[in-house]
Image (spheres, rainbow, N blue to C red):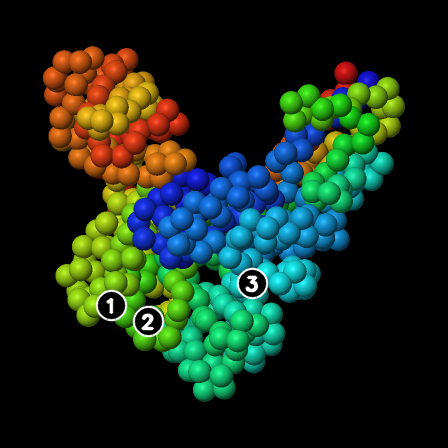
Amino acid sequence: MVVVTLQRKKCIGCNYCVDLSPNDFVMSKKDGKSVLLNSDDKKGFFTKKTLDNTIFDSCDAAAKACPVNIISVKMV
Amino acid sequence: MAPAGNFESMQAALDNGADSIYFGVEQLNMRARASINFTLDDLEEISSRCKAKNVRTYLTLNTIIYDHDLSIIKTLLKRAKETGITAVIAMDQAVLMAAKEMGMEIHISTQINITNIETVRFYAMFADTMVMSRELSLQQVKKITQQIEKDQIKGPKGELVEIEIFGHGALCMAVSGKCYMSLHNHNSSANRGACKQNCRKKYTVIDQETGVVMELDNEYIMSPKDLCTIDFLDQISDAGVKVLKIEGRGRAPEYVAKVIKCYRDAIDSIADGTYDKAKVIEWMLELEKVYNRGFWSGYYLGQQLGEWSKGSGSHATQKKVYLGKGEHYFPKPKIGQFKIEAYDLSIGDTILVTGPTTGAKEMVLKEMLVDDLKKDKATKGDSITFPVDFRIRVSDKLYKIVKNEEIQA
């Protein structure tokens, strides 16, 4: 299972995650920050758990590119 | 014009005589990385607190803008207009257009790097105030202000365009912010306000052909000293500059307090004819007490380049040490109560109190009570009270100011 977390409050809207993992991230038209699709919000930490392990590589690339280090990706 | 990275700094600016403040909201400003940025909900308080003191408020919205930012720009501008923020400082044409459509006053950011009169003429279609490129000399600035007067170049308000320059604070190793170094090394774009400041580190230069490490006097080869103009402020005033901008939304409230106070004094002295060398020396000593990388005059006097900083951090002659938190204020006898959580405090120490409403206030401790007994020294765990003529709040922090012993030559 892959667990992806986005601490979206700190997002500066650079769009890297959407470029690298377009199936998992979109930019919000409302506030210009990144949105992790199909995630649950727990006190500002948006988490997505999925059995689809194929998303790991692209999400990991997004996490590595993120300039403010607010994305984490784990294989559990 | 003073930087306000948070309410502490804003209050410090208000208390020390700033005419205007500038600040960022959310992510679309040149200090997007800052841990505390104002949010949309803060606009109202910023506006009302500044209006009460007759201080103008400027919203910075000066990063590069992508398509997905367009809607938040409109939200921000709309809210800024509703809450009575004076103007927006803009770089991207999308912001210029949106603000113009809304009838919001526009100032041109230094990120546009205006270096000539024709560019001023062009942006006069949108803006009443323009920040010049930080790389111009004062002579060049003067020519521009004279030409504005001569050609009667007016902004949308129908008044002559006002010219603003940076007066004090950090300089960029590239042409003001137009830098890809942070993006290259850390994937973190300076042009989106996320500069990692990697130019401030130590570097060696190696010749790739021979492997020879080049000899350099200074390893901080890309870190410029901080700009300081207080010693030639009369020339700046003479060049027709209307607004002096102080850099430092990332700096501490006591920094804002000190720098604004010095420049306020200096500007007032020029106005009443008492600006002189003795005063400059006093101000310089004050300015050296707070965060700085050593000072130089930037590009204004046309000196050669190569004024690089000699260390990675600050050369400030003083530093603050955290002591504790505000507990209570007795308004009638004007006594403040603090809890000491670290270090110790003695009579005669210079103390600093900072807080979102308090700003940054410095004073010398003349007397105090420790757990209701008169004492000369308080240590960790003590609850202390002392007379103080401003209100102490639980959100206030108490520091003492000590000499910085580890100043590098």
* Residue under pointer 1: B270
Label annotation for residue B237: 2
Give the mark, 2 or 3, whose residue is nearer the N terminus.
3
**Helix, strand or loop at disc 2?**
helix
Q: Mark 1 packing: few (<14 Cα in 10 Å), some, or many (20+)? A: some
Crowding at dot 2, Cα within 10 Å, few <14 / some 14-19 / many 20+, comes out as some
User: Three-letter amino acid code at disc 3?
Assistant: Glu
> Which residue is at a point 40% across and 48% down the rendered structure image?
B52
Q: Residue at x 75, y 41 (%)?
A: A28
Q: Are marks 2 and 1 in contact (CB under 8 Å)?
A: yes
Q: CA distance from mark 2 to mark 3?
A: 24 Å
Mark 1 chain? B
Q: Which amino acid is tagged 1?
A: Ile
- The picture quadrant where one finds residue B360 is top left
> Horizontal and vertical percent for residue B227?
37, 58
Q: Which residue is mark 3?
A: B105
Circles 1 and 3: CB atoms closer than 8 Å = no
Question: Percent x, y for residue B202?
Answer: 44, 46
Per the model, the C-alpha gap separating discs 2 and 1 is 8 Å
The numbered mark 2 sits on a residue in which chain? B
Q: Nearer the viewer, residue B366 or B345?
A: B366
Q: Is residue B328 above or below residue B225?
A: above
Task: Tell me which numbered mark, 1 or 3, is placed earlier along the sequence.
Answer: 3
Amino acid, disc 2: Ser
Q: Nearer the viewer, residue B310 or B283?
A: B283
